[in-house]
Image: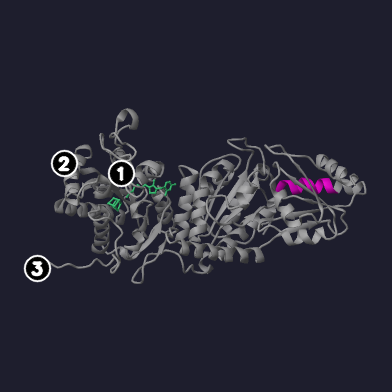
């Protein structure tokens, strides 16, 4: 077998990552960069990076990036795409960013069927601010603000925002994947490819929810974090395609 | 071009399109709804983008997104909605992105009411959102001036890469007057914005970020902004003087109130009282120098506002104790009358 490690064109070389060992953000970044190269769209790409652990994503991506206010990624992405539809627009967001403070922007950009792609990193905590409870925190999961474990009587239930979005006609493609090992990584790359291609084809809003390890705030080793995703997180958030209207929209020529 | 009879709210919209604005984002709120409706009716015909957003937060962030591509962008609202936009305005200032933001002010605080007010002066002239920044603020006094200043606001926003505020009030939004519009700009002739994000193509990638973790670097960025603000203070001050040549007392007022004050001045002049008006057109940068000038020969000033007293603090800062400064305000959406102002001018003149 001839294995080659080719550095992705749209990922900067010679930068030191600030992500913790075993963090999923770095893997997701690399996948995004690789797919941009595979589809030859990196030169037209503008990514909106969130407030969250990926706030410094612009230091790593080697294509154009705009940093957003916490939660407003899809509003900014809407502005970019509408002002210049030739650009390929990605909003990269964490679970707090997308499903708490930015919920309104998330739902309405999807409902308008904005021709953008959302990369949604679900790590079940607020990573950047030190491991507080997120809308996607599992029942019973201990965080710094759900100290006895998430209890629905006080903290409500894990929010399945991507399932909600999948019900909207504006959302052409939604899939949940898990960074829980090599197979999950390969599947995630395939999912991102499908989503990006939907945008290239002008079919509307696409979102890939990626269950992603945060070893630091989960207080687990990177290996145990992969295991926890596989064994616990996917029970609450099963992986799979949540909606795929590509064929239908292509036939109906619902291009935006 | 011929005169058209048109409302203030519609004028903001028409003038923006003529100034090359091709993206408008807004959320309905009275008393500025006609502006959003005007854009809904005309923007797409002009080849531009109109979105009724889900909130003012979304609107200002769409504004940021569109602006970073180099497009001329406008968003508008009234007082409570402008409060919601403040985080985004701070980001625009930090990212040095141009945008024009219209505030058709209404009575407050809180939900207040939908009547004309000038209660957002502090918010507009002191930055408004978090952090160390300023925004140029234009306060038109007539509908014709809305047309001219809206056009001008886009030029200033692009020239300095800054958000610019246009401050009107409920009365001005609804008033109709004959207006001659500036000739539309040809988009193809507008200068390329080198800084805009257009995708890296085969070149180097770029990013726009307001996160500057190193305090020394952030401090440097702050001082860089200050140098820009100093340039704006030097170049962009606008005001109108009305009958100040022989005046014994000068009224300071802006926007709708300045108009009412002109009525009062005409009235007291028939009674032999020599009153004049200084009308700031830019509220920031504030026309300090002319006030200092006037205070060297005129010893009485009276500030009229539709607020409990906000601009009066800038007048005090400019003049200090070089002259006597009185204040009369009607907050909460009450519109004062020329007769009322005339009484106050009379009273000041008769006091030693
Ligand atoms: C208006 C505002 N509120 C709060 C914050 C602080 N803040 C920054 S990131 C963040 C949460 C990040 O969590 P998530 O979106 O899940 O991303 P992660 O760090 O886990 O990748 C918070 C609360 C902020 N930057 N702005
Ligand atoms: S705190 Fe969690 S999400 Fe943030 S960099 Fe570390 S591992 Fe990644």
The extreme top residue here reads A153
Task: Tell me whether circle 3 and circle 1 mark residues in contact (CB < 8 Å).
Answer: no
* Quadrant location of the N terminus of chain A in the rendered image: bottom left
Badge number at residue A231: 2
Q: Earlier in the sequence, mark 3 or mark 2?
A: 3
Magenta-highlighted residues:
B255-265
Q: Earlier in the sequence, mark 3 or mark 1?
A: 3
Q: Tell me whether marks 3 and 1 sit on the same chain.
A: yes
C-alpha gap between disc 3 and disc 1: 39 Å
The extreme left residue here reads A1
The extreme bottom residue here reads B203
What is the chain identity of the residue bearing mark 1? A
| Residue B88 x %, y % | 49, 51
The one of B95 and B271 positioned closer to us in this rendering: B95
User: Element at badge 3?
Assistant: loop
Task: Tell me whether circle 3 and circle 2 mark residues in contact (CB < 8 Å).
Answer: no
| Residue B103 x %, y % | 60, 47
Q: Which residue matches tag 1? A: A125
Query: Does label 1 point to a residue whose CB lies under 8 Å from ligand 1?
Result: yes
User: Element at badge 1?
Assistant: strand
What is the chain identity of the residue bearing mark 2? A
C-alpha gap between disc 2 and disc 1: 17 Å
Q: Main secondary structure of the magenta part?
A: helix
Left or right: A52 as drawn, with respect to A208: right
What is the chain identity of the residue bearing mark 3? A
Q: Which residue matches tag 3? A: A2
User: Element at badge 2?
Assistant: helix
C-alpha gap between disc 3 and disc 2: 33 Å
């Amino acid at each position: 077998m001839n294995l080659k490690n080719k550095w992705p064109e749209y990922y900067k070389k010679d930068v030191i990552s600030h992500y913790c060992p075993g963090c999923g953000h770095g893997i997701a970044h690399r996948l995004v960069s690789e797919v941009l190269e595979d589809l030859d769209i990196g030169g037209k790409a503008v990514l909106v990076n969130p407030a969250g652990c990926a706030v410094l994503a612009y230091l790593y991506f080697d294509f154009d990036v705009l940093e957003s206010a916490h939660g407003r990624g899809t509003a900014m992405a809407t502005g970019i795409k509408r002002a210049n539809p030739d650009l390929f627009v990605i909003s990269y967001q964490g679970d707090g960013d997308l499903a708490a403070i930015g919920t309104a922007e998330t739902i309405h950009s999807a409902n308008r069927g904005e021709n953008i792609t959302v990369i949604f990193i679900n790590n079940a905590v607020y990573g950047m601010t030190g491991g507080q409870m997120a809308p996607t925190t599992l029942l019973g999961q201990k965080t710094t603000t759900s100290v006895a474990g998430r209890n629905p009587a006080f903290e409500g239930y894990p929010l399945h925002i991507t399932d909600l979005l999948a019900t909207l006609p504006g959302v052409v493609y939604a899939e949940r994947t898990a960074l829980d090992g090599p197979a999950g990584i390969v599947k995630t790359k395939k999912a991102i490819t499908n989503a990006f291609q939907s945008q290239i084809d002008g079919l509307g809003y696409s979102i890939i929810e990626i269950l992603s390890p945060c070893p630091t705030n989960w207080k687990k080793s990177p290996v145990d974090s992969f295991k926890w995703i596989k064994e616990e997180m996917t029970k609450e958030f099963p992986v799979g395609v949540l909606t795929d209207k590509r064929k239908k929209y292509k036939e109906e020529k619902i291009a935006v | 071009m011929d005169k058209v009879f048109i409302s203030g709210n519609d004028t903001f919209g028409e003038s923006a399109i003529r100034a090359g604005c091709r993206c408008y984002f807004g959320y309905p709120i009275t008393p500025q709804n006609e502006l959003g409706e005007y854009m809904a009716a005309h923007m797409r015909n002009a080849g531009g983008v109109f979105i009724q957003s889900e909130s003012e937060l979304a609107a200002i962030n769409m504004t940021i997104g569109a602006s970073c591509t180099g497009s001329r962008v406008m968003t508008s609202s009234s007082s409570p909605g402008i409060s919601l936009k403040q985080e985004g305005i701070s980001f625009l200032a930090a990212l040095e992105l141009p945008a024009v933001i219209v505030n058709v002010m209404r009575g407050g605080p809180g939900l207040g009411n939908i009547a004309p007010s000038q209660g957002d002066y502090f918010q507009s002239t002191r930055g408004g959102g978090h952090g160390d920044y300023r925004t140029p603020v234009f306060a038109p006094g007539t509908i014709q001036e809305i047309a001219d200043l809206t056009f001008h606001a886009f030029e200033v926003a692009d020239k300095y890469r800054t958000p610019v505020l246009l401050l009107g009030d409920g009365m001005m939004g609804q008033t109709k007057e004959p207006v001659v519009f500036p000739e539309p700009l040809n988009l193809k002739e507008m200068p390329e914005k080198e800084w805009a994000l257009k995708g890296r193509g085969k070149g180097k990638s770029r990013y726009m970020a307001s996160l500057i973790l190193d305090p020394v670097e952030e401090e440097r960025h702050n001082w860089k902004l200050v140098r820009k603000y100093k340039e704006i203070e030097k170049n962009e001050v606008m005001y109108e003087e009305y009958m100040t040549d022989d005046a014994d007392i000068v009224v300071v007022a802006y926007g709708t109130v300045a108009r009412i004050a002109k009525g009062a001045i005409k009235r007291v002049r028939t009674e032999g009282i020599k009153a004049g008006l200084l009308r700031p057109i830019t509220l920031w940068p504030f026309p300090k120098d002319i006030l200092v000038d006037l205070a060297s020969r005129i010893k009485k000033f009276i500030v009229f506002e539709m607020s409990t007293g906000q601009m009066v603090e800038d007048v005090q800062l400019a003049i200090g104790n070089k002259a006597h400064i009185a204040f009369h305000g009607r907050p909460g959406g009450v519109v004062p009358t020329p007769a009322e102002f005339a009484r106050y001018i009379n009273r000041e003149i008769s006091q030693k």
